[in-house]
Amino acid sequence: MTRKRAPRRGLVLGAGGVLGSAWMIGAMRAVETATGRDLSGADLVVGTSAGSVVAALLGLGIGIDVMANSERGIYEAGDPVLDYRDLGASLPPRPRMRMGSPRLLTASARHPRRSSPMVTLAAMLPQGRGKISAVGDLVTAAMDRKGLDPTEWPTRPALRVVAMNFDTGERVLFGVADAPRATLSEAVMASCAIPGWYAPVTVDGQRFVDGGTRSPASVDLLADAGLAEILVLAPACSFQLDRPRGTVARVERQVRRAATRRLMREVEMVEAAGTRVTVLCPGPEDLEVIGGNVMDLTRRAQVFETALRTTGEALHVAARSARSGVAGATDDGATDDAEARGGRLGLGLAG
């Protein structure tokens, strides 16, 4: 008897800074608790920026429970330490007084439809002075603890890391055969190099910066991956926004709104190819804790704990609504805000 092959599943982890990482780990822990599924069992994991760090650790066999403990300051011998203080302060260092990428600005002007306001802004920003090496050191240390060759990439799950070429604006998917050859730590550093904050990372003679500059999650790159379903965690997006008072937070919410529109266009593209997609994003309560600076290290623990609770609640409401056959309503008749906390929640999470 031929054994039926299980459907292939993907996990996409998006951009979102230090607080996006904390939110993502809390949300993933909630998913595992609610569904009993080990998210590291995905066949393909794609990470962008903050998501690339989490994706790399998953690919190296580091469980979400270990990452959750790290967010709480709990470590056991041999565990990786997600301590981002070595990245510097919660504000960028004074940049160099030179444009980040004149070539990218020229390319954006010549082909505006291929660009975006974020890409153009990245090109115009001064060159960052920050060092992203602490992220690479974290990945290298995790590989050392696992006894892995630092030049090799994990194969189960297949791991992909998204960055942007800082001179052409094109996305690169590190880990595929035709991508510039990079170690996993180099790829993660490139994916996390925020323009204007950190210096670009040079790989194979080319400069790369944060993949989130082009897309909050790059879900569309999986349209032809042959996956049955994809779970997307997108810390930089939200289906329902809060109403912050601060100017910085209000600007951040406008950027978040645009990122969400981009994300949903990509999701529609992937769904049109026959793949089922479930998306989780921060909701208003999460955003209130995140504030306007996603690099604010002092908020990590609170963001993690909030995400753990709000995502768990959203999953519970979605499952209860599905069991009752009434989508979007709770027992007391109130409108279900599951989509606001984690849009497009589906029962396919159970595994």
Image (cartoon, rainbow, N blue to C red):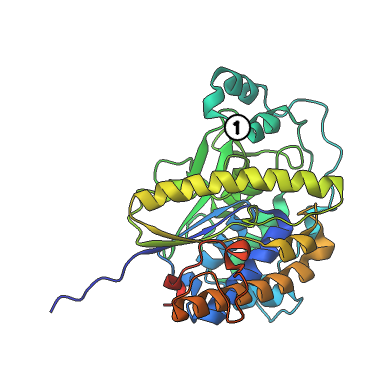
Q: Quick one: label 1, few (<14), some, or many (20+) residues within 10 Å? A: some
Residue at horizontal 68 percent and vertical 70 percent from the top: 307
Q: Is 43 left, or right, of 22 in this rendering?
A: left
Toward the viewer: 196 or 111?
A: 111
Give above or below for 27 relative to 91: below
Residue at horizontal 62 percent and vertical 25 percent from the top: 104
Toward the viewer: 309 or 161?
A: 309
Q: Secondary structure at mark 1?
A: loop
Whole-percent x, y for residue 351 in the image: 41, 77
Residue at horizontal 22 percent and vertical 73 percent from the top: 4
Whole-percent x, y for residue 347 in the image: 44, 73
Q: Image quarter for residue 288?
A: bottom right
Give above or below for 86 relative to 77: above
Q: Image quarter for residue 243?
A: bottom right
Q: Image quarter for residue 233?
A: bottom right
Query: How many numbered marks, from 0 up?
Result: 1
- Visible in this render: residue 97? yes
Looking at the image, the residue that sits furthest to the left is 1
Q: Which residue is mark 1?
A: 116
Q: Is 182 left, or right, of 3 in this rendering?
A: right
Toward the viewer: 257 or 327?
A: 327
Whole-percent x, y for residue 53 in the image: 61, 59
Quadrant of the frame with the N terminus: bottom left
Give above or below for 159 relative to 174: below
- Visible in this render: residue 193? no
> Label 1 amino acid?
Ser
Residue at horizontal 78 percent and vertical 70 percent from the top: 302
Whole-percent x, y for residue 309 in the image: 68, 76
Toward the viewer: 264 or 211?
A: 264
